[in-house]
Image: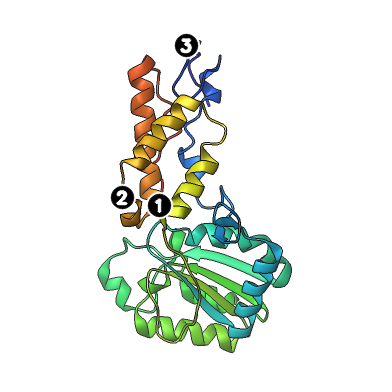
Amino acid sequence: MTVARNTQPSVLGSYGDASTASNPFCSRFVRPGARVYLVPGHSIAGYEEVNAAWIDEFVSSLREARCGLVVGPHGTGKSTLIHSLMATFRMRYARVTHTALHSECHPKRRTTLRYPFKQWRDFAAVLRRTMSNQLVIVDGLEQLPLAARIVFVQAIRHRGGHLLATSHRALLGLPILWRTQATPLLVRRLASDMLENIDPQARGVVERALDARDLKRIENIRELWFELYDVLQLNSVRDQDPQRDSTCHSDFAS
């Protein structure tokens, strides 16, 4: 990554090299897997990183149910939770496959059983490769038509596999193993963690931006990070008009 040299103080940090003054809400810091999922805990902050005991309980529930859902609105950490569990999944299952359903596919194709997965992989091919003690992870299962979804789940069960899917809503016949949601306390905790190592001036900019919002109305935390990314960039530009790093932006797919 090439970044112009900058010897002037930045709202993102008073550093000699602008490459070290990265926006903490840049996509590489907020994308799924960049951070460990937080669950309600007994700490002062109210939330804590998933620990071994919590993970064991979740995996045990999944193995008992064989198929289950992680349900929540857009941008509330469903994919982050999956990434946080992936290492344990690989130890507990003979094989783990992870794929996502496209949301922009042609409507006519969504009425067939040949609904495409990410990178145009057909879910029928996934079924053919499913074996005993395999975990199939699917992001966005609700996009599959009901008839196709029933066939898909039954086929995985028949082959001795397990299914963990994310969805924005409850789905018929699949137990909900965990619900994700945005809360003011969670937003504050995540923002505090992300601002830990940045310049105090930049921290103040973000904290004032958060204070100006009604955090109880926040449903999509990822969208909030996009907004805060722009807030910091605009303040940085006002201070010194630096060259913007085109490789670090908040527009990415989840």
Task: Identify which residue is drawn at 63% across, 62% down.
Answer: 86
Task: Identify which residue is drawn at 44% across, 50% down.
Answer: 187
Measuring from the top left, give residue 72's x and y in whole percent.
41, 66
> According to the image, label 3 marks what residue?
8
The front one of 45 and 73 is: 45
Q: SS of the residue at dot 3? A: loop
Q: Does any portion of residue 166 appear in the rendered image?
A: yes
Of the image marks 3 and 1, the number of the one nearer the N terminus: 3
Corner quadrant of residue 136: bottom right
* In this picture, residue 141 sits left or right of residue 80: left
Q: Residue 221 shows which numbered tag?
A: 1
> According to the image, label 2 marks what residue?
214
Question: Residue type at mark 2?
Answer: Asp
Q: Is residue 36 above or below residue 129?
A: above
Quarter of the rendering occupied by the C terminus: bottom left
Q: CA distance from mark 3 to mark 1?
A: 32 Å
